[in-house]
Amino acid sequence: MIRRITPADCDAIAALEARLFATALDQARLMGLQSNPVFCGFVDLVPDQDQPQSISAGDLAPYLNGYLLATMIDGEAEILSIGVTPDRQRQGVGKRLLQHFFEHGTSQNMTRVVLEVAEDNVPALGLYRDFGFVEFGRRKDYYKQGNRKIDAIMMKWCPTEAFP
């Protein structure tokens, strides 16, 4: 089940962000996004787990499969982050979240979507391409992973191309 993000989800999302990304959004920033009228966010829930549960060390979010965070202004959207719990990756969670986002965007007359992704995130690049995103630029050495620097690939959704 996919539903809108609530403030009660911020701790779980922040914990997953910290595990997945070096440039993670923290709980305070996530709470701030919640009050922004252009914010748009969704969580994909484990079946029969529609309410946040306490998070223990080593167990990120027992109710959460993943999340999508975005902003949308006058039909233009930017996907800020998509995260999927590690043990649920490559099981269609990201695809479900993007499909839900596009359905929501259609109801909001969304005409353009941009995002950035690390050039070494091959699964995400494939998913975005499946949805009709194309590269339009790069940010050289944008991400830092340990001692390595990785380019950010800037992508945009081309509405003339179909998405799954």
Image (cartoon, rainbow, N blue to C red):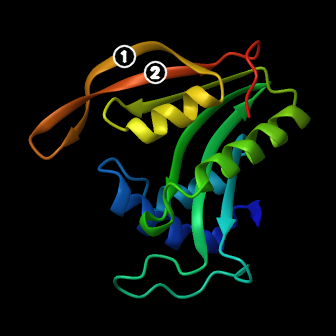
- Extreme residue toward the left, this view: 147
Viewer can see residue 35 = no
Viewer can see residue 147 = yes
Residue 138 disc label: 1
Rendered-image quadrant of the N terminus: bottom right
Q: Nearer the viewer, residue 105 or 97?
A: 97
Q: Secondary structure at mark 1?
A: strand
The residue at 56%/32% (across/down) is: 128
128 vs 56, left or right, is right
Q: Nearer the viewer, residue 93 or 78?
A: 93
Q: Is residue 89 above or below residue 62?
A: above
The amino acid type, in three-letter code, at marker 1 is Arg
Q: Secondary structure at mark 2?
A: strand
The residue at 83%/42% (across/down) is: 104
29 vs 139, left or right, is right
Q: Is residue 81 above or below residue 162?
A: below
Q: Nearer the viewer, residue 132 or 3?
A: 132
Rendered-image quadrant of the C terminus: top right
The residue at 45%/69% (across/down) is: 87
Q: Residues within 10 Å of mark 2 (few under 14, many from 20)?
A: some
Residue occupied by mark 2? 154
164 vs 21, left or right, is right
The amino acid type, in three-letter code, at marker 2 is Met
Residue 9 disc label: none
Label 1 – label 2 distance at C-alpha: 5 Å
Where residue 51 sits in the image (x, y, percent)? 70, 82
Where residue 83 sits in the image (x, y, percent)? 50, 54
Q: Residues within 10 Å of mark 1 (few under 14, many from 20)?
A: some
